[in-house]
Amino acid sequence: MEKTIDENKQGKSLVLEQKKGNTRKLFIESYGCAMNFSDSEIVASILSEQGFNTTQSLEDADLVLVNTCSIRDKAEQTVRKRLEKYNAVKRINPKMKVGVLGCMAERLKTKFLEEEKIVDLVVGPDAYKDLPNLLAEVDQGRDAINVILSKEETYGDIAPVRLNTNGITAYVSITRGCDNMCTFCVVPFTRGRERSRDPQSIIEEVNDLWSKGYKEITLLGQNVDSYLWYGGGLKKDFIKASDMQKATAVNFAQLLELCAKAQPRIRIRFSTSNPQDLTLDVIETMAKFDNICKHIHLPVQSGSNRILKEMNRLHTREEYFELIDNIKNILPNCAISQDLITGFPTETEQDHQDTLSLMDYVKYNFGYMFTYSERPGTMAERKMDDDIPEVIKKRRLAEIVQRQREHSEIKTKAYLSTTVEVLIERESKKSNVQWSGRTSQNIVAVFPKEQYQIGDLVNVNVTDCTSATLIGVAIGYSKDN
């Protein structure tokens, strides 16, 4: 495998892994969560063995794949619009084939072939190993579909082809699926039950990334804290496991420690956590190792106990506060971020005020905030009326966003006149004479380039800030550079 330089739509150079002798061109786009982007790298690896190298040029592609998200209706509409663009290109290049991957493919199944005549191929998240067979069908002029969910597939035996990489940061998938069954969420229906990947294969991937010059990894899962390896199988079957299997089982805290020890100079992040599963031993492990980044993304969804119950979130407001207190006591320098949904069915003004008061208690560093979007097939869609008027949803969202903006500003201003450690990842979006990188707390920092390069770990003196970005001057390399 060799690396070449290509240009993306913004004209920035990207490193693409290419296999010599491959003659077909794959254009792949990903939408939604980080897991989709990681899955696309698995797909690129599988198709690399079928003669495909990736390209950044849609017009040159022999095969176009879009990896989709179903978490909100807006995400699905974005994909529909991209398919219109593909269709325009396909009229010029009729030999081009188009496939839909991911959660939207799993949700709609054969409907995709009926609704979008441009689509030749529909593949769910657990069926990517079947792509060679499906492409053979497409090459014979037939539509192809595989959306069967697996109870075992983790793709742990496939080395991903890193897409659009800066050569510095990479995703490492450790679990797939989700067992939580939140009433608003389509993920259990599109990604199946929870299953964990062999820890040895995870460590091997981490070691390989370090050997290739990567400086930071993110351990990924729909719910990373549920990670549990005892020789394979679903988490729910753990109670049936033998005593030996239980004695040698590896949970998420132990996996974090294994990764931190395997490569003590690589930075480690993880996403996403669930409040009901984030245990004290995970927080204590984070405190124990300097190379585990001090940031926890901890979706709460609502500050109202009544709404949390309606959502089937298995934590209360008070339990969430206790968890936040433990994080702040054990990791006082840890950043915390959130996911919040406003306008869930039956949400009252008091429920909304409970969410705002929860935000005041935690004071998140940043977050992702949305109005409720009814998803077909979920318990909320089947059992609840989407009864909150859109105008009220938008007003409540605006208030939540404003409150978060205020808290973000407080948090970033606390870094003024301090020194932070930053991993340089890319050129600043706003200036070609500045670098952009992230701190351990996942806060973006920008500073003059000077002699530093992408991949350097540097100390930055913070002189100014916005609500989301630290601004400063590099004062030297970090001791861990």
Image (tube, rainbow, N blue to C red):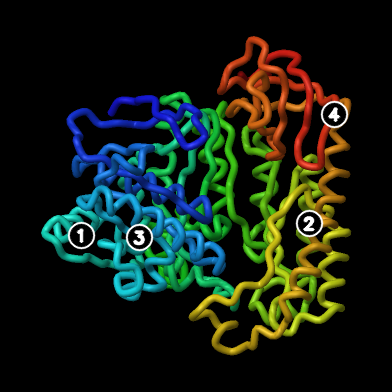
Amino acid type, mark 4: Asp
Left or right of 188: which side holds 337? Answer: right
Q: Earlier in the sequence, mark 3 or mark 4?
A: 3
First-in-chain label (4 vs 1): 1
Q: Which residue is mark 2?
A: 324
Query: Residue 281's x, y, as percent?
Result: 66, 51
Label whose residue precedes the other's in the sequence (2 or 1): 1
Q: Residue at x 67, y 11 (%)?
A: 450
Inter-mark Cα distance, 2 to 3: 39 Å
If the image is split into quadrants, where does the C terminus sit?
Answer: top right
Q: Amino acid at mark 3?
A: Val
Residue 464: which disc?
Answer: 4
Would residue 133 appear left or right of 29 to someone viewing this image? Answer: left
Q: Earlier in the sequence, mark 2 or mark 3?
A: 3
- The amino acid sitting under disc 1 is Leu
Considering only order in the chain, which callout, 2 or 4, is on the residue closer to the N terminus? 2
Residue 134 marker: 1
Q: Is residue 208 left or right of residue 188?
A: left
Q: Nearer the viewer, mark 3 or mark 1?
A: 3
- Cα gap from disc 2 to disc 1, whole angstroms: 47 Å
Question: Which residue sits at x=85%, y=57%?
Answer: 403
Query: Is there CB contact under 8 Å for labels 2 and 3?
Result: no
Q: Which residue shows up at 76% across the image and 41% down it?
A: 468
Q: Residue furthest top?
A: 451
Q: Which residue is mark 3?
A: 100
- Measured Cα–Cα span from mark 3 to mark 1: 12 Å
Whichever of callouts 3 and 1 sits on the residue coming sooner in the sequence is 3
